[in-house]
Image (tube, rainbow, N blue to C red):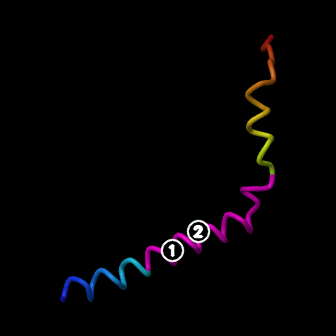
Amino acid sequence: MNVIAILIPVALLLGLGGLAAFFWSMKSGQFEDMDGAANRILIDEEDD
């Protein structure tokens, strides 16, 4: 029973940390251009 008393708060803290990281990434614009990286690899640029 003591293990459950430790694991439940740890799981809640990890979940809240992941949720906070997700909201931070949304606020900082990490998901603004979802197609740009996918199309950038297809562009053939030759270095001179």
At label 2, counting other C-alpha atoms closer than 10 Å, the crowd grade (few under 14, some 14-19, many 20 or more) is few
- Disc 2 target residue: 21
Q: Are marks 1 and 2 in contact (CB under 8 Å)?
A: yes
Q: Quadrant of residue 37?
A: top right
Q: Position of residue 13 (x, y in %)?
A: 44, 80
Residue for point 80% across, 40% down: 36
Whether residue 42 sits left or right of residue 3 in the image: it is right
Magenta residue check for 27: yes
SS category of the residue bearing label 1: helix
Residue type pointed to by label 2: Ala
The magenta span reads: 13-32
Above or below for 16 versus 21: below
Residue drawn at x 76%, y 60% as measured from the top left: 29
Q: Quadrant of the C terminus?
A: top right
- Residue matched to label 1: 17
* Position of 25 relative to 16 (above/below): above
